[in-house]
Amino acid sequence: MKQQLMDGRFTKQEALHILSALYGAKIGFHEEKIRTTEMNEEDIKHSEKKIKQLQQTFSELRYKIQSNKNEVLDIHAAIEVAL
């Protein structure tokens, strides 16, 4: 099942706000999972690695958006859920 999540034009500030919330939700999910779930060391390391990857990806994306001369950006995002 595929759902269109976003398909629009946003200012740089709006885009950063939206993307920050999305990345923050995913990072928060992994942080909460580490805190509240009994995980073995390998699973914890996997979640920690994923958190670092997400932080790095968002940091690079934020830099590219802020450096871009365009004041309006298009964002297209879809989510696919396999049922």
Image (spheres, rainbow, N blue to C red):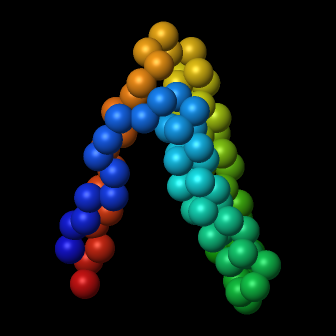
Is residue 50 visible in the rendered image? The answer is no
Image coords of residue 43 (percent x, y): 65, 74
Residue 40 spot, x, y in % from top left: 71, 81
Along the line of sight, the residue nearer the viewer: 32 or 4 = 4
In the displayed structure, does residue 17 sit left or right of residue 41?
Answer: left
- Quick one: which residue is furthest to the top in this view? 69
How many labels were placed on the picture? 0
Indicate left or right for 28 with 69 as reference: right
Q: Nearer the viewer, residue 5 or 34?
A: 5
Q: Quadrant of the C terminus?
A: bottom left
Kindly indicate the quadrant of the structure image that contains residue 74. Answer: top left
Rendered position, 72 above or below 45: above
Q: Residue drawn 53% across and 38% down?
A: 14
Direction left: furthest residue: 1
Q: Is residue 82 above or below residue 75?
A: below
Residue at image point 79% right, 78% down: 35
Q: Is residue 25 above or below residue 72?
A: below
Q: Which residue is painted at 54% across and 55% down in the image? A: 22
Quarter that holds the N terminus: bottom left
Q: For residue 30, say whether it is visible.
A: yes
- Looking at this rendering, what residue extends furthest in the bottom direction? 38
Which x, y percent locates residue 19? 53, 46
Residue 55 placement, left or right of 67: right
**Residue under the image location 64 percent in, 56 percent down:** 24
The picture places residue 58, in percent across and down from the top left corner, at 59, 40
